[in-house]
Image (spheres, rainbow, N blue to C red):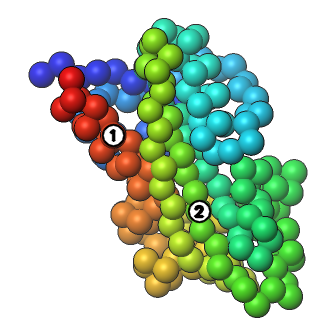
Amino acid sequence: MYKKVIVVASTNVHKIEEISRILPDYIFISMAELGFDQKIEETGESFAENARIKAEAVSKALKLPALADDSGLSVDALGGEPGIFSSRYSGGGDAENRALLLRNMKREKDRRAHFCCCVCLCERDGTCTFGEGETYGRILEKEEGSQGFGYDSIFFSDDLKKSFGTASAEEKNAVSHRARALFDLRRKLEKAALSL
């Protein structure tokens, strides 16, 4: 059976493997494999806008369907920060981002937070389909575990009853915001295929 090829607007091999497991009816390849190495400015004001900007840029340049995601951490006590600026919150790397967030949360009793993800599939004709997912928990007072990346070691998952930093990749992927966004996208694609 023919499988549709979709370019992933990412160079993260683990992310592409995760996407391939959740959407097995498609073949996913990295944009880097096809020679796309341009810097895409994420100028959107939401996860959906940033995902669309990336997917459209890659699809237009390579003339193939493209999938992109944008995700981040939203903390209730900080009015939703760091939000769409999660990866560049401190101006440094992951460790600096976590340290800044922990400092900003030092006196906060309300530690509720959630990860958000939006994925966008842009077809060659410019049509876009979106999927969204969230996973809830709270911000710990100190780091726990060294698994994962980003804010994982300071995020206690309501689903797993432990930090993402102490969870296996399989455990995290079962409840992650990205997995839920991809499942949402898959449902929409299946529904669209049935209506043709």
Q: Which residue is mark 2?
A: 115
Q: Amino acid at mark 2?
A: Phe
* Front residue (pair 80, 138): 80
Question: Residue placed at 43% from the left, 78% from the top?
Answer: 160
Q: Residues within 10 Å of mark 2 (few under 14, many from 20)?
A: many
Question: Residue placed at 51% from the left, 61% from the top?
Answer: 134
Q: Which residue is mark 1?
A: 188
The secondary structure type at the circle numbered 1 is: helix
Q: Extreme front residue here? A: 195
Would residue 196 be found to the left or right of residue 75 on screen? left
Q: Extreme left residue here? A: 1
The C terminus: image quadrant: top left
The secondary structure type at the circle numbered 2 is: strand
In the rendered image, residue 55, in percent from the top left (x then y), is placed at 55, 27
Q: Is residue 87 visible?
A: no
Q: For the residues labelled 1 and 2, say whether their Cβ atoms are less than 8 Å apart.
A: no
Q: CA–CA distance between discs 1 and 2?
A: 21 Å
Which label number is shown at residue 178? none
Q: Amino acid at mark 1?
A: Lys
Q: Is residue 126 above or below residue 95?
A: above
In the rendered image, residue 96, in percent from the top left (x then y), is placed at 82, 62
The N terminus: image quadrant: top left
